[in-house]
């Protein structure tokens, strides 16, 4: 307990580092997944390649991916980019399917109506399909965010792991308080992001709460 | 004017859904494409705004090939009403209606103001404008769909089975509403349906298509009923077509005879005295018909009360009625006497089935009935 009180400031700043390491990949992964998922929702061939490939990426052990990153990217071992790039891959693995499913769930009559009104494909995507995909898409983003917040700590084994460093440190020093504090901090971060995403989702989709049958 | 010139749509697997269609759609009327599923009616409609591109042949819109401009530009100039309305669930009713004007560059606030006016035009209260489509009934959504199609004031309106997903009573209301709107607006409307009754009710001209995308007949509804081109059209037009054709003949020549009336609240004695052939129509102060009384229904009461009335049949409006409404009023009346009313709904007399049939024979002799 005294360790925790003595190290509150370090815990706080490390939590912020941890959050960035987790969130940058969510944003980057979402930006990459949108065009890929769009392709998968549009062409059956693209879907039959992209979705299983993305699923396979997720099965790569995180530690292996972290270790491989410097070899692939040519970065230094301690570069945070290694963790960010690896987690972006995991995010893409999760979100390609979410984006494809979310876009496929937009009612065909609505997209047909948008086309008939005179939307060009890109305009239709941003004005109609993407907003309507938000509820399903957001579910995927929440999973990816929480998953990333938890995975960042594995990066501690290659020296960049946010709160994860308290696991390795606490283990080496035989200091359980350090480990428990980091676990709690990670849980708090995950919970906080969940709440923010749910609130943001509600703000983005006022129409989804109006109920009634369609 | 919309002209189909030898238009064919063949899919990659060889299926021909529209086969060398030649058709001219006149301005300012409702042209209905009707036929069984697989007859290519929706495909034909969607080729007009290039939702589907023809494999061969040409479609001219006011003399210009529709392929001369980009599909998006073309579509912004053609109203489109889709089955199930196809409203954007994430946009308010007003923003749905304002879609095309905004795409065309109208300022959002201006477009919304115009959208609110359009809502009233299609018979919706303005306060619905702030709601989302899911908060509306099916019939209301369909009206919004029509308002959205009209928003940029396009000369041409395409309607793809717009009323097929609503219940019959609502559908009837929507059809009346469309005819009323059309009498104000005079758009060139192309309407697709699989319901021949809807086609006959709405169409100025009806194109009957057969499976495989061939035009079977293109004619006015009256002609279609009186002179179907072949067995397919005859069977598609269906039973009772002789009777339904009466709906296109004016009942001006039908003589309206007297009918016994009695005021609501009159004594049973008074009522009995006024019976004619055993029946009398009970009317309110404005002489509007409420129902019938007969010898039998008066035998147990001493006053004509609303709960004792025998309910009447359909009513025949003298000025605007057709032979069909005249005959139906006589056939559906418990007294075998149809009640004729004026435009205000007041009883002016009665019609007998025999005189309607005689009027039909007279009309035939004068050549008013196509044979």
Image (cartoon, rainbow, N blue to C red):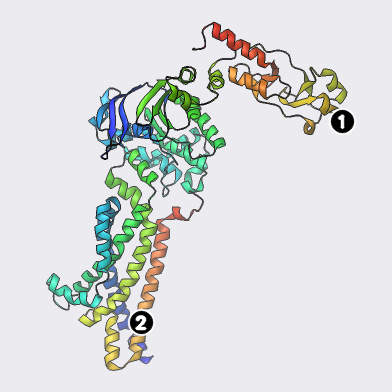
Q: State the mark number for residue B325.
A: none
Q: State the mark number for residue B300.
A: 1
Q: Secondary structure at mark 2?
A: helix
Q: Is residue A34 left or right of residue B81?
A: left
How many numbered discs?
2
Q: Position of residue B179 (x, y in %)?
A: 49, 27
| Contact between labelled residues 1 and 2, with CB atoms less than 8 Å apart | no
Say which quarter of the image contains residue B96: top left
Query: Residue most toward the top?
Result: B366
Q: Is residue A119 above or below residue B204?
A: below
Q: Is residue A205 left or right of residue A61?
A: right
Q: Residue at x 39, y 62 (%)?
A: A200
Q: Secondary structure at mark 1?
A: loop
Q: Quadrant of the N terminus of chain A?
A: bottom left
Residue B343 shows up from this direction? no
Q: Which residue is mark 2?
A: A183
Q: Is residue B37 left or right of residue B269?
A: left
Say which quarter of the image contains residue A168: bottom left
Circle 1 Cα neighbour tier, 10 Å, few/some/many (<14 / 14–19 / ≥20): few
Towards the viewer: A11 or A22: A22
Q: Residue at x 30, y 36 (%)?
A: B15
Residue B10 shows up from this direction? yes
Q: Position of residue B49 (x, y in %)?
A: 32, 33
């Amino acid at each position: 307990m005294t360790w925790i009180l003595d190290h509150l400031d370090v815990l706080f700043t490390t939590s912020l580092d941890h959050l960035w390491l987790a969130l940058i990949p969510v944003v980057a992964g979402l930006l990459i997944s949108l065009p890929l998922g769009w392709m998968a929702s549009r062409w059956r061939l693209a879907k039959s390649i992209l979705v299983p490939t993305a699923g396979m990426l997720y099965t790569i052990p995180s530690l292996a991916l972290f270790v491989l990153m410097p070899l692939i990217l040519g970065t230094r071992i301690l570069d945070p980019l290694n963790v960010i790039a690896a987690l972006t891959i995991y995010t893409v693995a999760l979100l390609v399917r979410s984006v494809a499913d979310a876009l496929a769930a937009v009612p065909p009559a609505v997209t047909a109506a948008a086309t008939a009104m005179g939307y060009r494909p890109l305009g239709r995507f941003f004005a109609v399909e993407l907003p309507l995909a938000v509820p399903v898409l957001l579910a995927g983003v929440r999973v990816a965010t929480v998953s990333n917040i938890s995975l960042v700590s594995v990066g501690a084994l290659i020296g960049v792991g946010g709160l994860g460093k308290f696991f390795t440190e606490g283990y080496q020093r035989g200091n359980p308080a350090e480990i428990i504090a980091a676990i709690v901090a990670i849980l708090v971060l995950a919970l906080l992001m969940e709440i923010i995403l749910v609130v943001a989702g509600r703000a983005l989709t006022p129409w989804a709460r109006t109920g009634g049958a369609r | 004017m919309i002209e189909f010139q030898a238009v064919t749509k063949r899919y990659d697997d060889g299926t021909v859904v529209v086969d060398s269609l030649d058709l001219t759609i006149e301005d300012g009327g409702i042209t209905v494409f009707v036929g069984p599923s697989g007859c290519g009616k929706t495909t034909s409609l969607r080729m007009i705004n290039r939702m589907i591109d023809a494999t061969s042949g040409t479609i001219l819109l006011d003399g210009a090939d529709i392929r001369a401009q980009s599909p998006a530009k073309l579509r912004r100039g053609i109203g489109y009403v889709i089955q199930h309305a196809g409203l954007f669930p994430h946009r308010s009713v007003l923003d749905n209606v304002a879609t095309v004007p905004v795409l065309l560059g109208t300022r959002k606030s201006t477009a919304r103001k115009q959208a609110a006016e359009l809502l009233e035009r299609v018979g919706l209260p303005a306060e619905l404008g702030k709601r989302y489509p899911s908060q509306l009934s099916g019939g209301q959504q369909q009206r919004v769909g029509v308002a959205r199609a009209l928003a940029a004031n396009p000369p041409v309106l395409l309607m793809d089975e717009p009323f097929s997903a609503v219940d019959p009573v609502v559908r009837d209301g929507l059809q009346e509403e469309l005819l009323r709107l059309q009498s104000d607006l005079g758009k060139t409307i192309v309407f697709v349906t699989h319901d021949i009754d809807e086609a006959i009710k709405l169409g100025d001209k009806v194109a009957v298509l057969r499976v495989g995308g061939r035009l079977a007949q293109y004619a006015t509804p009256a002609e279609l009923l009186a002179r179907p081109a072949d067995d397919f059209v005859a069977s598609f037009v269906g039973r009772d077509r002789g009777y339904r054709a009466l709906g296109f003949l004016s009942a001006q020549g039908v003589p309206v005879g007297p009918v016994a009336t009695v005021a609501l609240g009159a004594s049973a004695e008074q009522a009995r005295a006024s019976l004619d052939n055993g029946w009398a129509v009970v009317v309110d102060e404005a002489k509007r018909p409420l129902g019938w009384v007969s010898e039998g229904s008066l035998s147990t009461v001493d006053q004509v009360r609303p709960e004792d009335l025998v309910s009447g049949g359909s009513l025949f409006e003298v000025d605007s009625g057709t032979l069909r409404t005249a005959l139906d009023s006589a056939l559906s009346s418990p007294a075998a006497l149809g009640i004729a009313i004026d435009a205000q709904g007041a009883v002016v007399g009665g019609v007998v089935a025999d005189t309607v049939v005689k009027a039909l024979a007279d009309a035939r002799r004068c050549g008013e009935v196509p044979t």
